[in-house]
Amino acid sequence: MNYKLRCMHCGKIYSPDEVKYTCPVCGNRLGTLEVLYDELPNEKKFDLEHKGMWAFSKFLPVKADHFEVPLLVGNTPVYEKVELAHELGLSNLYVKDDGRNPTASYKDRASALAIAKAKELGISTIYCASTGNAASSLSGLTAASKMKSVIFVPKSAPAAKITQLLVYGATVIAVDGSYDEAFDLSMEVGEEFGWYCRNSAVNPYLLEGKKTGAMEAAFQLNWKVPDVAMVSVGDGTVVSSIYKGFRDLKESGLIGKIPTIIGVQAEGANAVMKTFESGIFDEPNDMEAHSIADSIAVGKPRDVLKACKYVKASGGKFISVSDDEIGHAIVELARKTGIFAEPAGATTYAGLKKIKDELKGKSVILFITGNGLKDINSVKEFVAQPYVVRPNLKETKEALRDAGAI
Ligand SMILES: Cc1ncc(COP(=O)(O)O)c(C=O)c1O
Ligand SMILES: [Zn+2]
């Protein structure tokens, strides 16, 4: 596909070989670029089952003979939840479970794209800074592609995510600092050694990989897109990608409308929401971030400008929910749908519960971005403990009676 890159801040248009990642005039933070295609395809058949996200490769900034990681990325299920929709007063509720990706998060869509681009350039090492998922995704997908990854994570990232990195054989730098500090360090080191950058907000192509989540959902729903799409927000790239996916489909004539996009943040890390509400999108309201939803515990969101502009264009907004609401949402979502989401994944459900009255009568899709097994510690305090018994019938029956199971 032929494409150009446009700066989100100054609007300058670049050809892909003119710039590396961001607008040289506006810098890394505000000068994020968006990919604009010369022409979008108008085809209706997509082989999701065999190709996953690559079914949409004609909508992606890759060459016809691009590299595809030998794992099925995407083709994650969308479930229609009739009873739950009714209970919440919605006309329809759809839940797209992206925890079903190869490394169990939405981030695989971006990593697959990063690998394709790095292969194009002949670069064999890719680096990223991550709260955990982008990193485990990159390390898993580079392992499958016989490439190397160098990962910068905050030392405090959940053990399951760090273990994933080590199992896949990544070089892991655990930074004794915040995600925001790990990010700045990664950029410095990655630049010095000429590695390919898989930092989503900085590299405009990664969002294009992520937008396939929205495209898949539209295809799976037979191009009848819901009124509202909800997704959790840290740096702001995933929420931007959801908008961009729907926008590209609308421009290509495949869908009639773009859903209203609602970004959900954790209360202790709601910098994007604050910036959105200030109305001045190029003056980010950075903060120190705290949340059990580690994946979205971002205080200095890197894609804030794009996220605010795109969400505004969709007629949407940002909301935030407390850690307590997130914890309860994990448990309730699991019990009502069978989907066990990590805290950042269930944040969308917490957001839906919070504003359900506003959404009365509407159809809604929730994007669940990560699997619950990624972080079991945060949810422990929201569930009961198991009954411990000696292996005899009497104690077992007592426990069952106590639990109300008999
Ligand atoms: C599970 C999960 N959900 C949501 C997000 C938010 O994405 P973004 O930082 O692009 O806003 C992340 C990012 O790490 C994530 O891992
Ligand atoms: Zn610019």
Image (tube, rainbow, N blue to C red):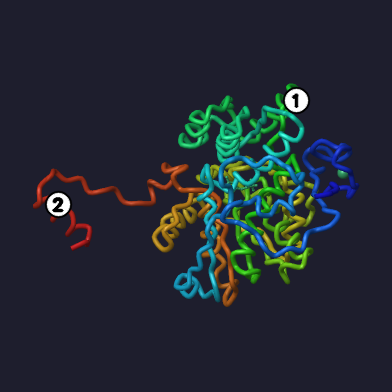
| Residue beneath the point at 50% across and 64% down | 79
> Is residue 52 in view?
yes
Give the amino acid at mark 2.
Answer: Thr
Residue 94, position as x, y percentages in the image: 54, 66
Q: Secondary structure at mark 1?
A: loop
Residue picked out by circle 2: 396
The circle drawn on residue 118 is: none
Instruction: Please tell me in which quadrant of the rendered image residue 300 appears.
Output: top right
Q: In this figure, which residue is indicated by the disc labeled 1?
A: 194
Query: Relative to residue 118, is residue 338 drawn left or right?
Result: left
Q: Measured from the top left, where is residue 401 in percent x and y?
A: 17, 59
Whole-percent x, y for residue 178 in the image: 60, 33
Compare residues 107 and 360 and report the one nearer the observer: 107
What kind of element bears circle 2?
helix
Distance Cα–Cα, label 1 vs label 2: 61 Å
- Viewer-side residue, 280 vs 95: 95
Between 305 and 165, the one lying in front of the other is 165
